[in-house]
Image: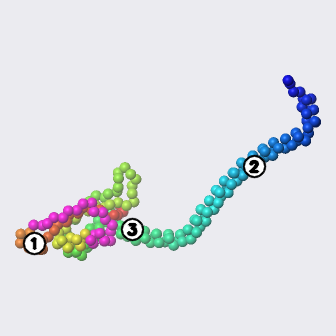
Amino acid sequence: MAIETQDVLAFLKKYPVAIGCGVLSIGLLAGSYLRSSTEEDFVAQVKQKDEEGKRIFANITSGTNVGEQLEAIKANTKDLESRLVRGSDRLRNQQYFYRLESDTGVKEVVLQAGAVNTGSAKGPKTLYCGIGYSITVQGSYRQILDFLGRLETGQHFYRLNSASVSRVAQRSAPEATSLLTLTANLELLGLQ
């Protein structure tokens, strides 16, 4: 059974209102579907813009004291860098140990500058390095503790790699005044 054009035209003329309502309904459904998909996109865009606005507002409110904070950071950095030693300035670095010796009363037996530790050989070159020293001092128990305490709270940052304390054998001295020997390998934090 084949439908011909004349049959279709006759059907359209017979039910024009029903066909118009059907076409209108299909058009409204298609429009509603398209409108709902753009509404979801619009809601997603509004949420994204709202989050971006909140982030910008937080940056503005947090950034009110940035200038003051930057100046404080610069001052602290300058203070910290003043505590670093220079790898090329060995005499000044050794003078630091001589001052510790005179302040604590220990007798410095050996002071040797070691290698500069720039970090791992495979990694990138670092700004700061460890400047190695090997030091041996003699003194009483209190003097050795005072020396270590002043080294720890001193002007420069250091890392103690190894240390050993031994008693010096004295034939004529009583046990109460026995001397100790401290041998330490340490690194001062510095710049190359």
Alpha-carbon span between mark 3 and mark 1? 45 Å
Residue at disc 2, secondary structure: helix
Q: Residue 35 carries which label?
A: 2
Q: Residue 14, relative to residue 120: is it above or below? A: above
Q: How far across and down, in percent of the image, does residue 53 sit?
A: 63, 62
Amino acid on which disc 3 is placed: Glu
Cβ–Cβ under 8 Å for marks 2 and 3 = no
Q: In which quarter of the image is the N terminus?
A: top right
Q: How far across and down, in percent of the image, does residue 101 sit?
A: 22, 72
Counting residues from the N terminus, which is met first, the one under dot 2 or under dot 3? 2
Q: Work out whether residue 155 can be spotted.
A: yes
Q: In which quarter of the image is the C terminus?
A: bottom left
Alpha-carbon span between mark 2 and mark 3? 64 Å
Rate crowding at label 1 as few (under 14), some (14 to 19) or many (20 or more) other CA atoms within 10 Å: few
Alpha-carbon span between mark 2 and mark 1? 98 Å
Residue range corresponding to the magenta coloring = 149-169
Q: Residue 145 carries which label?
A: none
- Residue that appears at 25% across and 69% down: 148
Amino acid on which disc 2 is placed: Arg
Residue 152 located within the stretch drawn in magenta: yes
- Residue that appears at 31% across and 58% down: 116
Q: Name the residue under label 3.
A: 81
Point out the frontmost of discs 3 and 1: 1
Q: Quadrant of residue 189?
A: bottom left
- Residue that appears at 51% across and 73% down: 68
Q: How many labels does the image show?
A: 3
Point out the frontmost of discs 2 and 3: 2
